[in-house]
Amino acid sequence: MKTGLFFGSFNPIHVGHLIIANYMVEFTDIQQVWFVVSPQNPFKKKSTLLADYHRLALVREAIYDDRRFRVCDIEMKMPQPSYTIDTLAYLRDQYPDREFAIIMGSDGLPTFHQWKNYEEIIRTTTRYIYPRPGFEGKIDEHPNCIFVDAPLMEISASFIRDCIKKKKDVRYFLHARVYEYIREMHFYE
């Protein structure tokens, strides 16, 4: 089964993430998407993150009734910061019947060469690239990538956090269950 690994902090998960995941299972050969909740992205400050268990809970709330999606907490059990190459090795060992691919935004391509063992990832793992604002690179410069014509999502978790802090209503940017969880817990206020 081809499984797309959608890595992210999901701080919080929003409709943009869900639209991209939905697109991948409906319009590519990816059969299931696993949301890999990262405890610490090596390129981001951890101080801005909700606790790991809250971000996992938010993802569970967002995908609770969709069998095409799954939350993956493996990086919570690995040394931090987490590295994609290590996660891939572990998952391939644990799930030898699955073919894993990476789902990533085009905005991650300019810094992909900074990822740990990025050459090995290119060699062994197809990357499904969805459009993100500001990508100026050339498609043919990125080997083992499939560029998908997914909707351009100009929404980010940082935008949502900022809006909540400013007391803006963001209910339609989030799955209803995620919105209620955030509201009840007073997150990002």
Image (spheres, rainbow, N blue to C red):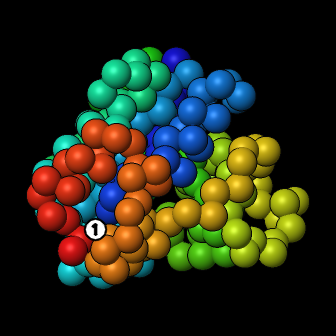
Q: Is residue 139 visible?
A: yes
The location of residue 54, given as percent across then percent down, is 16, 53
* Vertical order, 101 against 83 (above or below): above
Seen at 64% across and 69% down, the residue is 107
* Vertical order, 156 against 73 (above or below): below
- Residue 29 falls left or right of residue 43: right
The location of residue 9, given as percent across then percent down, is 35, 60
Seen at 23% across and 47% down, the residue is 180
* Vertical order, 58 against 52 (above or below): above
The location of residue 179, given as percent across then percent down, is 30, 50
In terms of depth relative to the viewer, which is nearer, 153 or 33?
Answer: 153
Q: Quadrant of the C terminus?
A: bottom left
Q: Residues within 10 Å of mark 1 (few under 14, many from 20)?
A: many
* Vertical order, 51 against 57 (above or below): below
- Residue 185 falls left or right of residue 82: left
Q: SS of the residue at dot 1?
A: loop
**Residue 48 falls in image quadrant:** bottom left
Identity, as a three-letter code, of the amino acid under mark 1: Gln
Seen at 28% across and 68% down, the residue is 40
According to the picture, the residue beneath numbered tag 1 turns out to be 40
Seen at 39% across and 52% down, the residue is 171
Q: Is residue 83 visible?
A: no
